[in-house]
Amino acid sequence: MGVIAVSDAPLHVLAVDDSNLDRKLIERLLKSFSYHVTAVDSGSKALEFLGLHDVEVQNFSSFSPNPEVEVNLVITDYCMPGMTGFDLLRKIKESKSLKDIPVVIMSSDNIPARINRCLEEGAQEFFLKPVQLSDVDKLKPYMSKNKRSTTDEEEYDKSRARYDDGNDDEDDDMEPSFKEKDEERRSFSKDQSC
């Protein structure tokens, strides 16, 4: 039996963090905004909750979401054992049935390349821990059950501007070459700091 969405039903956030303390904090902050929160301690449990039960399968587009739940947003820690928050983000965005769920990444590490990579792969926001009430307030545009007034490209541009490196070099306006992008991908995939 499926759940019927009611217009005044609380919006549902799936919070993913392997740290019990951080998971309780984000759950408490989200509940202070009257969101319904489901908290899990791993990316694989998040995928299972979303209805993607076989986490070994590479192509998730053939799976359907859990018909019993409607998740309006996923907020996940970046550094977790097993499946990172970045891996979870990619699996959600690869799924035909889940790709429209907004995903927010949070981390205690302020690494610009990591932040930008997550935003490029589809994260709506990247929060530095500890997450604050003001951060949770930024989720409101993504939590609306109605379509947002801005396009995804506009949101991406606004997010990118916040994480600019502050370097005023003239080369910043130039698109990186294929070689530079390839080197960035390789260095990012070697990022084993979690």
Image (cartoon, helix red, strand yellow):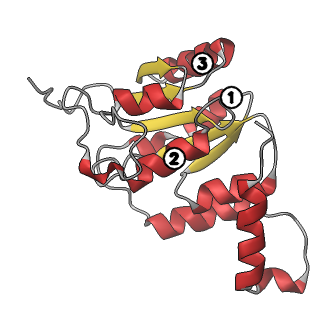
Residue at left offset 42%, top offset 20%: 38
Instruction: Quote the CA–CA distance across marks 1 and 3.
Output: 13 Å
Instruction: Work out which quarter of the rendered image holds the C terminus and state it.
Output: top right
Q: Which of 48 and 176 is in front in this view?
A: 48
Q: Which of marks 2 and 3 is nearer the N terminus?
A: 3
Q: Determine whether the residue tagged by mark 3 lies in a helix, strand or loop.
A: helix
Position in image of residue 113 (x %, y %): 77, 58
Q: Is residue 77 left or right of residue 72?
A: right
**Separation of marks 2 and 3 at Cα, in angstroms:** 18 Å
The disc, 1 or 2, on the residue closer to the chain's N-terminal end is 2
Residue 67 position by quadrant: top left
Q: What residue type is labelled 1?
A: Gln
Foreground tag (2 vs 3): 2
Q: Is mark 1 on a helix, strand or loop?
A: loop
Measuring 62% from the left and 63% from the top, which residue is drawn there? 158
Residue at image point 32% right, 25% down = 10
> Of label 1 and label 3, which has the lower sequence position?
3
Residue under label 1: 132
Dot 1, how many residues are within 10 Å of its Cα: few (below 14), some (14-19), or many (20+)?
few
Q: Locate residue 60, reporting x and y percent.
A: 34, 49
Q: Could you say which is closer to the camera, residue 116 or residue 95?
A: 95
Residue 176 appearing in the image: no
Residue under pointer 3: 23
Q: Can residue 90 be seen in this view?
A: yes
How far from the left and from the top, in percent, is residue 143?
Answer: 40, 41
Query: Which of the 4 quarters of the picture holds residue 161?
Result: bottom right
